[in-house]
């Protein structure tokens, strides 16, 4: 029987301004390297590999010594894009949300955006986010990362003009149902205009921000 | 075949300080009247009939002319308890949450508690709830009623000492799943110590407050 | 007992560029009129009332003869904003998705944006959306409205640079679970960067687009 | 790229009488130590770290030799509050519910409350809880911890005046769905006034009791 | 095109001691009459038609003047079986559960069993069910009907030797999810040996009891 | 604002052998007529309109007097295809499943297939389906329609060579969750090779059969 | 702080004919031994410990050398009851269902019942179960264990007079959702009178059979 | 106690053209060997063992040296069927879907069908699947394997005449809910006639294709 081959979509960046991202789970290290080589050869940048295992990291950084591994974000970045205009805030409700927030921050930076981090501003101490409004008001887009009840995006969206991209995280237990509580809450936000990405999808939030700032 | 009879728990008030409440749905007007008469005869007070139909209201107010029908709350109250110490805030995130908030308020009042209403303080305009902190700080208990993402209880619980009783409402559509989003969010609150009752259960929230203030 | 009052957040437009929207369900016509008067007095515009009943429409248009009722969108608009720069495509997968698409289109227009409609381009005939790529490439933002499997946003996002806002609709039956299939599908899109709003939330999608185009 | 910092809400105790609790999962030992130091420096007490790993325990007790690790509760306590008035019963339906019950008991004790334990009084032998009514009647608040069908809070609430805080546990298998059966059952209690916290959230139940007894 | 015909399983009673029951919803009155005639002709008894509409009742009682319509149970019974040995208790937690309890009682009677009704013995007043233990101890089987948290079957099963058949009802709102809370609770009962039938399925519970008493 | 237009996919039949089907819900009668005219003009056949309202039927049959309305199936058929080779069995577990079965039968006939109906062969009387095996063995494809536990497709697939297309129906109540029980059961069939369509989707099953018989 | 003690319900056997069963998960080996000693001392028999770990087995069999460990069932049995009248069939649909079936068989035997095993009679080969009807007809009760679509109980219940106790198993993947498909299917059985226990609850099924045969 | 025996359905191939497949999980290596021997002895072919562990593979290949283990598919094949007419495309949306796609491909080959692999044609780059239409048009059946939003089957079914069998995979995270998003999407396809098998069920898809091509 013939062996299945991997065929990345090397033209996606030309069509959409954003390359195909390599999703680590379920792929062998060899498949990841093959896809990365195809993309690199086609001039695509940046090259991102998300949710990687230690083995995948080792194989990748050996083949591509210029690759940077972001440990908190668990993300490999190769050939980052040059710096461009646009600043994105990555707001994290709590310390446990940082891996997802860092995935967003590292992805945004890989696309050339400037990143401003705002951490530990959960709604239990709402004055903390209010103190950061001057910072948030300067942003071109705001990514808000929150687990548990996921209430922070509504609060932020009631305070600033910029587009607010909500990222539910799987932080919590029991009735959070691995991010479902935050996801439903963000989709049900009483502030129309909040947009939502998948649970723990910091990467997607950053790429959404990049689209918004690419016009 | 013998006919089934209704047998209210006339001793519950003596055991717990709170009488059996008559839940309207699925009961005939005759059954409701029979239960109310048994309770009244046993000296139980107050007598509450919740989630009533127009027919049930008509039959009840005809038999008990002293009964008061709270229209927004859709609640019948007979033989309210005498005024007692204790003030409860009933905080409603939005105007659409008022039926549930009024069920809480009318129930608390029927148990002799003083009620302070705080309305339209949703998290989209978080300064509004901050302006009401002086009022909330005076309360013995705070009932917070919110639909959609149900974020308000976390914000309130981060601002006051009093016990916070969260009531999710079925206000919203789509991913609110008839109150599920708010319910899960309140249970997942990042402020430990928030307690939660069933969706749209203003009555239960008021009775919980009454228990807390009965020591 | 005191009566609960309605208190709209008249300052939200100043903070965020977007006013509080009046959500019709669960409000009396009187409450809607009171909120609208408060907003109008505070100089807020546009004023939108969504998901209205025939009674609410009648009361509103009698009090505000300048109000326009969008029948397909089931939306009342008063005091639309002046035309501003920015063109949004509202893409509808099928004819049954039109009420949600029209809610998006009417809202975007009420905020002063230009709207381009693209209809009946479901993924069952993928050449149809390909034929519209030249139109979509000119857009500043693309709202994609789809029920059933909700696959269209992924296809569109793989074809254009603009931000793609996905709106799942409750069109379908059985395993669509009133929009859940489309919602989960859009959140799980293989194109990172697609952002999602609540089921049937055309209004929120348009307001998200407005935020993106307000920088 | 700058590194994200942790910023605990050191003022929460002043606002609410209860400090921020450190939730262990997803945090590095370093982050936990940093937060604990900030809280300690700000004079906050007690300091609680919940759901800890062996590594977190080792690092914490090395840095804070006065810390006490409650093994059954899997909870670290530092700087407990002085004893105050108020006695809380922690009622556990079965032996498998003890970890959650002990989390509640250790938390309540850390806040200075007296704790009375009542164990193995599940509804399968309802006389057992009846025998404990004299004890329960003396309590200022009753925390009821139960898994499987989670029926015990309704029974207890029908027997005593004190506020009843229900804690569903994830004990069971199959149709318990990791605590969902108990959670839904407790929210649906036929005794209005029962309040509920998240699945396995003994800590939150104790903090709710502390709020109730702080007036 | 040929028309589809209805073909009842006239031999089921011979194989299992229980006839095919006619489930009303989705059938025309004509189809119900045709099935009933086929069963009657084959000597099957009793003939039961469940969950009937007013039109179906009218057509059925006109064609079969001996049929009895049980209004609370919403059940038609024709040709009841002769009285046989065996007594079944039908225990209802609350008044709102009576329609389901009566469906169980009427079905059991139609199969020739004696029925003992025990009503209003919900777990909120657990002494009430304890008072009925002498009655329950005389039974050959006990059907326990309960909505909301559905806790009663566990309590009863901890008190008697007889088989306990639990029937969850859709009584309640919000987190009861139309009987789901009671269903999951009954399946998760801490008393192994409780058996469960579908939500609101009083008929099935009675037929299960009949099977148990047919040996 | 420009009005949205309807644009059916008139080329789908040429590409796939099957035309776009008009899904009635959410469309105005005018929209349905417009789509039907476009399809008719393009020479597409058959034209099917599913899940229609009385108003839609009236408008359609007035405009297209040749249209046939299948009442049990609630389906409009215009311009049926000529008879072709291939016979499909439509097997219905119970009488309440007939509307879905008839939708399958009428659709298959509209595509020119011969249809054999097998009704009332539910698994409670498994000998009934065994008696029909000689019929089923002659079929080119077998559509099995069943609600409740949806077990019939597994039994049929264990008896014949032909492809088995399972159609779950929403017949039942409580734990059937409007067809979810049957859907999950059919997907989990212990006979690998059973294929499944959406709940109540008789039309889709017939079109799947048509694809299978078109080679 | 005082240590929580374990207090088994030693009187349950006297009240119900069935002792408290020791559920292994979440208990220490010491707690299990303590409970077993209390039960043994009170003369309770049999003593069952379910879902045990290797450590629990080792500690138990060391303390109680007479205990028997059933490996497939993962069940410890001590002091089995004397043989009594009554034969139960344990019917397993497939080989993967055997652990649950053996839990049922070993439990029934521990209560003194005779057990007849019928294996590999899944509905994919329905003749296999038909061949076993003579055996099944002799039984006093029939326990039917099935995973995946869980269809076997309906087929069996349509063939025999005896009570049928359905046990869904978590065998399968994907849409079986760890036994949910089988559970919902069994609850939705088209044969009224089938009773159901929790997923994988072979023990409960056997104890239900024991109750049925104890009259 | 007698030991339970395994009894495969050796006659299934004669009845249906397809043998019983051995599902690995929950079976001992000995049970698998016993079943395989029984099937082999009865002349059944091919013999497939799915979802195997390393131990099962080792034991199987030792006993049956002719067996072939497909690593990506995690499938054992013994005694493949001779080549027959019919070509099936196995289309995989992404590289992470390959294990499921290979299970389909290896199964189809074991039944004697020719297999054409089409990989990496996800809807994010819809031109890629369009380029493969000439290949797909030659196929007798098309199996489409996709995770995440699972949109590919709708696109393919809108392009070809052949029957389309959709296989959702558990690829993805968060709101994919382990394949639920793709499953619901495929069931809700806007192309009527797409048929669906269980999540990750490549084997079932291939056997469905084999049934379709066996006429």
Image (cartoon, coloured by chain):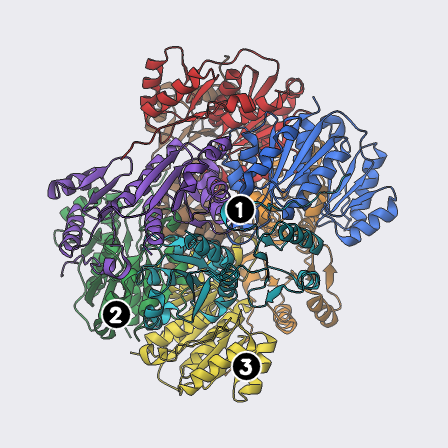
Chain colours: A purple, B blue, C cyan, D red, E orange, F yellow, G brown, H green
Residue corresponding to mark 2: H130
Query: Residue under mark 2: which chain is it in?
Result: H
Residue C27, percent from left and from top:
66, 52
Same subunit: marks 3 and 2: no
Q: Is residue C14 left or right of residue A100?
A: right
Asked if H101 appears above or below F47 in the picture, the reply is above
Q: Are marks 3 and 1 in contact (CB under 8 Å)?
A: no
The image quarter containing residue B163 is top right
Using the numbered discs, state the Cα–Cα distance from disc 3 to disc 1 in whole angstroms: 57 Å
Give the residue drawn at x 76%, y 32%.
B111
Residue corresponding to mark 3: F69
Residue corresponding to mark 1: C14
Q: Nearer the viewer, mark 2 or mark 1?
A: 1
Residue F63, percent from left and from top:
55, 86
- Label 3 environment density (alpha carbons within 10 Å; few <14, some 14–19, many ≥20): many
Q: Kindly state the secondary structure of the residue where label 3 is placed.
A: strand
């Amino acid at each position: 029987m013939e062996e299945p081959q991997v065929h990345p979509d090397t033209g996606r960046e030309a069509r959409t301004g954003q390359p195909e991202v390599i999703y680590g789970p379920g792929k062998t290290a060899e498949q990841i390297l093959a896809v990365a080589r195809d993309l690199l050869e086609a001039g695509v940048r940046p090259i991102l590999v998300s949710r990687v295992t230690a083995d995948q990291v080792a194989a990748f950084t050996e083949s591509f010594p210029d690759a940077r591994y972001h440990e908190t974000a668990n993300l490999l970045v190769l050939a980052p894009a040059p710096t461009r205009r646009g600043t994105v805030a990555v707001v994290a409700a709590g310390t446990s949300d940082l891996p997802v927030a860092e995935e967003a921050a590292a992805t945004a930076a890989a696309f050339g955006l400037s990143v401003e981090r705002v951490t530990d501003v959960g709604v239990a101490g709402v004055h903390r986010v209010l103190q950061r409004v001057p910072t948030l008001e300067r942003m071109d887009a705001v990514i808000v990362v929150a687990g548990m009840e996921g209430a922070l995006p509504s609060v932020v969206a009631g305070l600033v003009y910029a587009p607010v991209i909500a990222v539910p995280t799987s932080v919590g237990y029991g009735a959070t149902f691995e991010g479902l509580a935050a996801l439903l809450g963000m989709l049900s936000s009483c502030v129309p205009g909040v947009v939502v990405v998948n649970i723990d999808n910091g990467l997607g939030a950053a790429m959404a921000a990049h689209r918004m700032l690419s016009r």
